[in-house]
Amino acid sequence: MKNLLLSSFICVLFSPFLSFVYADPVTRGGEVATAYMKELKGKLIAAMSEGGPVHAIEVCGTESAKLSAAYKSKFEDVLEVRRFSDRFRNPKNKPAKEEAEVLQGFREELQKGTGISDHVLIENGSTVRFFKPILLQSECLLCHGERDAMPEQLRSMLDSRYPDDKATGFSIGDLRGVITVTMSKP
């Protein structure tokens, strides 16, 4: 009985410090996905200001992987953070089967015109995955809008670096892709 009381006391005493590990998956997934996208967007806007869209594409290609690794190491319960789309620029962002199903579900919701879910949560064994749709914003149009509207230098860079680029032709509000946060279950 003493051990149970002592354990309970220690858990209550230290619970504020343990919450970063044991947050509920919807809260943790939402926090991580939102922070990741906000940080990546900030880096891309800065890159656009510094060197234009060609520089922003280069930064996106390198910084997204670095951010994913940083968020994985920042939170003990986060196993992976990644973006994916069936209209990918980088083949590494091609969705796996489960991801493609989630993406299609978001797309169908959007096409119905009744709104789109904020997230989807899928539990699988010892992990839980949080999925959040990425809707195209105006800042993204230069690199993801109509190819004909892109500067020639950007089109040339995309043709050489991403010859099978599928990530163009979007409009504001289109489903660009999904960010997923995979976490260990509490």
Image (cartoon, helix red, strand yellow):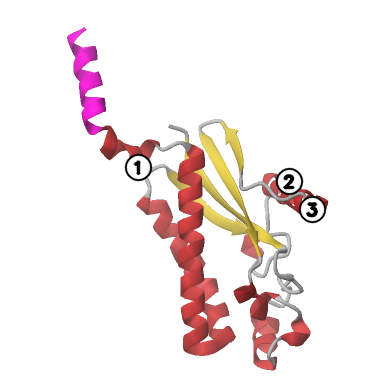
SS at circle 3: loop
Q: Earlier in the sequence, mark 3 or mark 2?
A: 2
User: Of the residues shown, which amino acid type is indicated by label 3?
Assistant: Gly
Report the side of 147 relative to 154 (left or right): right
Q: Which residues are magenta?
A: 1-14
**Gap in Å between the C-alphas at discs 1 and 2?**
30 Å
**Gap in Å between the C-alphas at discs 3 and 2?**
19 Å
- Give above or below for 126 relative to 95: above
Q: Residue 57 at x, y = what percent?
A: 57, 78
Q: Residue 91 at x, y = what percent?
A: 66, 65
SS at circle 2: helix
Mark 1 touches mark 2? (CB < 8 Å):
no
Report the side of 67 relative to 74 (left or right): right
Q: Quadrant of residue 83?
A: bottom right
How many neighbours does mark 2 have within 10 angstroms: few (below 14), some (14-19), or many (20 or more)? Answer: few
Q: Earlier in the sequence, mark 3 or mark 1?
A: 1
- Give above or below for 13 relative to 38: above
Residue identified by numbered label 1: 20
Q: Main secondary structure of the magenta part?
A: helix
Q: What label sits on residue 113 in the rendered view?
A: 3
